[in-house]
Amino acid sequence: MTSAGGYQDQQYWSDDGWKWKTTNNVTDPQYWDDPQWNKADHPVVGVSYFEAEAYAKWAGKRLPTEQEWEKAARGQEDGREYPWGDEFDKGKCNSAHARVSHTTPVTDYATGVSPYGCYDMVGNVWEWCADWYDKKKGLRVIRGGSWDDRRERKEFNVWSRRYDKPGLADDRDNTIGFRLAQDIK
């Protein structure tokens, strides 16, 4: 989207997103020019909710709802704790236990895929969801935990949720990214 001019094209941005982007003079993801964080096959990090939402529209897709995200992570309603089952396994996700200290290619943890074949539903990066965290509508849901989180903090369960502000220009960090969803046609 950056090299294709999406940051300059208002049609991809919500009204709030465009206002945020122009007010903060945002022209690309926070780590776009940083080779430590912008690598092939790694999740894009350093993006606000507004940037993730604009990218999804540019790509002809959307951000998943929180319910869709959890279904993709959990699979059938069998009550599992993790995409692969009920026991935490540090070899199945990029968490602080892996001691990698950064993102990894999305296919590195093939044994940790969800029943629907989705990679990195826990670990690697937190992922923006389309939903508001609460009725105040000031915070957006993020799901999944990141490379910097530990299981003891309950960040990796498929039901765990956190929040972040949709547009903090100074808080686009290297632990939050996104995935896309698509409606069935």
Image: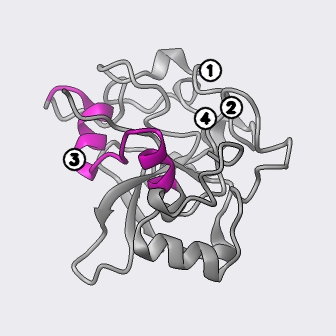
Which of the 4 image quadrants contains residue 39? top right
- The quadrant of the picture occupied by the N terminus is top right
Residue labelled with disc 3: 67
- Residue 48, magenta (yes or no): no
Cβ atoms at labels 4 and 2 below 8 Å apart: yes
Cβ atoms at labels 1 and 2 below 8 Å apart: yes
Q: Give the amino acid type for the residue marked by disc 2 in the picture.
A: Thr
x then y, percent, for residue 66? 27, 51
How far apart are the two marked residues, 1 and 3, measured between alpha carbons?
A: 25 Å
Circle nearer the viewer, 3 or 4 = 3
Secondary structure of the residue carrying tag 1 is loop
Nearer to me, 122 or 72 = 72
Q: Which is more N-terminal, label 4 or label 3? A: 3
Q: Which residue is drawn at 21% across and 79% down?
A: 135
Nearer to me, 19 or 39 = 19
Residue labelled with disc 2: 104
Cβ atoms at labels 1 and 4 below 8 Å apart: yes
Q: Which is more N-terminal, label 2 or label 4? A: 4
Residue labelled with disc 1: 108
Q: Which is more N-terminal, label 2 or label 3? A: 3
Q: Residue at x 62, y 20 (%)?
A: 108
Q: Which residue is drawn at 48% across and 45% down?
A: 58
How far apart are the two marked residues, 1 and 2, measured between alpha carbons?
A: 7 Å
Give the vertical position of 182 relative to 33 (above or below): above
Tell me which segment is drawn in magenta: 52-76
User: How many dots with numbers?
Assistant: 4
Q: Give the amino acid type for the residue marked by disc 1 in the picture.
A: Asp
Circle nearer the viewer, 1 or 3 = 3
